[in-house]
Image (spheres, grey):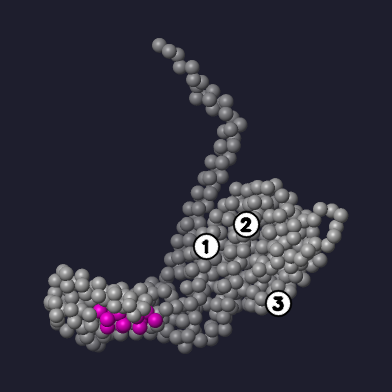
Amino acid sequence: MARDRRPSLRRRVGLGDDRDDVDSARIAEAMDYLRHRGRATLHDRLHQVRMALGLAVQAGLAAALAWIVSHHLLGNPQPVFAPISAVGTLAASVGQRLRRTVELIVGVAVGVFLGDILIYFLGTGGWQLGLVVTAAILLTTFFGASVAVVIQAAATAVLIVTLSPSTEDLELPRFVDAFVGGGIALLVTAILLPLNPLRVVNRAARPALDLLAGQLDACAEALRGRDRAAAQRALDRLRENKEELATLAEAIEGAKETSTLSPARWHRRSELTHYAEAAEPIDRAMRNSGTLIRRSVTMIEDEEPVPEPMPDAVAHLAEAVRLLRHEFAAGEDPEQARERSLRAVSEAGRAYDQGVGFSGSVVVAQVRTTASDLLVASGIDQAEANRLIRQAFGGQGVPDGGPAAPDPAPKTPTAPPLG
């Protein structure tokens, strides 16, 4: 019998002690990431619950009131459509509820019209139902209706065809319920239970701004430690920002709608203007920060010099984002955020003066551009923001990407101009 010449498990482990140390570190890092991800996921879910709490209470109240009005006041024995219309209006994209109510009524009108016409000429049945739905979708699409109108028309046509034979006079209650449900939904959001629009926007802005600040902090630490993997993780996480930005944009639209419809919230209009005007520059800051972090990854890969002020500049940007969120939430003029943005530019100028490589010059330029975006988000005019950026950058390097002055030492690459 052949003897097994493979080393024992203990010996095999012993032969790879050095490798095991590396693997253990990687496994520990992966486990830390998973634990953090689990906590972050729970935190995100709780935040989403808090965000949805107001809408859930509004929808419950609107559905109950729509049923009571339709059943007790209008005498509808089966007031199904009124609560559905109320919830459908509230479930629409925040900021489009008035439009959603109109769409519900238009869709109902089209569905009732097509359903009645085709039932009169063709009767009821499976193929008639299919024909009615097809006609409703094609007709509303031809006239350029929104997706909500198309769906509502098709759904109403289905109800008319399937329920008309067993339910008399279905058409008028359907119209009335659409009016009642949509109207009560607007009444709840505007008069009975209007949400604080500023609080809604603050909650929606927090994930987007925290994401940006967190990944800029991670990039700063990666530059200090020349940790390419950490910089890449920050870049990957920042790229997953579509949901946060979409939530912020939707919340701003909803807050503007609430402050327009609700007399109790009219005094919030001026405060909401800050957020409404800040949405676009915040989006630009996200994209420019992505370029900054991507170039930081390349800078570490290419072993370019990382002057000490460069990580500080990126960290100051992160703090400027946090200050912007805090001062907006407090309803204050974001002076501290502006000061920190300019400090980031000043540190970037020092880093440029000490000498950077090609990717380093791009990082410097992106610090300037992102700081400019944050200044605009804080309420400063773009031209004034660019002037302040140039002033903060000082005499270091070459402002605006102009040609460098003659120097016996090798020239550092020129930073691109402000975007």
Q: Which residues are magenta?
A: 99-111
Report the amino acid beneath label 2.
Answer: Ile
Q: Secondary structure at mark 2?
A: helix
Where is residue 52 drawn, in percent x and y? 42, 69
On screen, residue 152 versus residue 233, left or right, reads left
Say which residue label 3 marks: 384
Q: Is residue 15 visible?
A: yes
Q: Earlier in the sequence, mark 3 or mark 2?
A: 2
Tag 3 and tag 1, C-beta contact below 8 Å: no
**Which residue, given by chain and number where applicable, does mark 1 sit on?**
241
Write down the residue under mark 2: 293
Amino acid type at image mark 1: Asn
Could you say where residue 257 lies in the image, as x and y percent from the top left?
46, 81
The picture quadrant where one finds residue 96 is bottom left
Residues under labels 3 and 1: Cα distance? 28 Å
Identify which amino acid the numbered label 3 is placed on.
Answer: Glu
Q: Residue at x 54, y 65 (%)?
A: 208
Q: Is residue 12 left or right of residue 162?
A: right
- Principal SS element in the magenta part? helix
The CA distance from mark 2 to mark 1 is 14 Å
Check the image and report above or below for 324 versus 116. above
